């Protein structure tokens, strides 16, 4: 019968984790973590009363210490990067031929001055290029 203890705790952890998908408050997930912890301790053959105590203590510890941290991480507002470096990697359309002297591209709803990453390259109107860097007011672009 001692071998059944870990299986029961593992099964309880799995059921609780699956039910958490429907609840979404991380309550059942913390209790599942407590059951999983208890399953680990149960493998070494501790008495059932100790298993229950470990389950209660570990579930409470996960609830009070891990749950608030996870909720803050998941509910924190995402920051929106509006700086020009956020445009790196964007695709742009050439609207004025890009020569070693300069040119223009349209991306992110606006027209930007542009130059080629390789000074020997030229891009014609209509080419689609990728922004590799922003150098002040100039987009440095290259073509795939």
Image (tube, grey):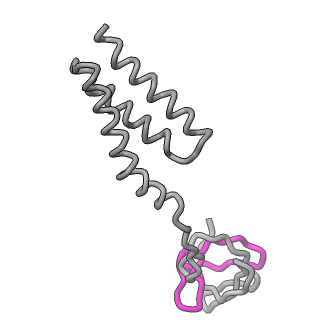
Question: In the image, residue 110 lies at what x, y percent?
Answer: 73, 84
Q: Is residue 89 left or right of residue 106?
A: left
Residue 144 position (above or below residue 19) = below
Percent of width and height locating residue 111: 72, 86
Which residue is pictured at 74% across the width and 80% down the height?
109
Residue 11 location, quadrant: top left
Which region of the structure is painted magenta?
Answer: 116-141
Q: How many marks?
A: 0
Please name the residue shown 50% across and 32% down the image: 16
Residue at 63%, 70% in the rendered image: 143
Residue 70, by quadrant, is bottom left
List the single residue furthest toward the top: 1
Residue 16 forms part of the magenta stretch: no
Q: Could you tell me residue 24's position as x and y percent?
A: 58, 45
Q: Nearer the viewer, residue 92 or 122?
A: 92
Residue 30 on image: x %, y %: 43, 41
């Amino acid at each position: 019968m001692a071998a059944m203890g870990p299986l029961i705790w593992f099964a309880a952890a799995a059921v609780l984790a699956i039910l958490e998908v429907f609840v979404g408050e991380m309550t059942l997930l913390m209790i599942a973590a407590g059951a999983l912890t208890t399953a680990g301790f149960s493998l070494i053959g501790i008495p059932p009363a100790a298993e229950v105590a470990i389950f209660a203590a570990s579930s409470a510890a996960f609830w009070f210490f891990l749950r608030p941290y996870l909720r803050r991480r998941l509910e924190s507002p995402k920051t929106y990067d509006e700086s020009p470096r956020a445009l790196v990697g964007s695709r742009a359309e050439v609207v004025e031929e890009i020569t070693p002297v300069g040119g223009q591209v349209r991306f992110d709803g606006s027209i930007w001055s542009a130059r080629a990453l390789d000074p020997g390259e030229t891009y014609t109107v209509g080419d689609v290029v990728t922004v590799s860097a922003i150098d002040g007011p100039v987009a440095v672009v290259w073509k795939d």
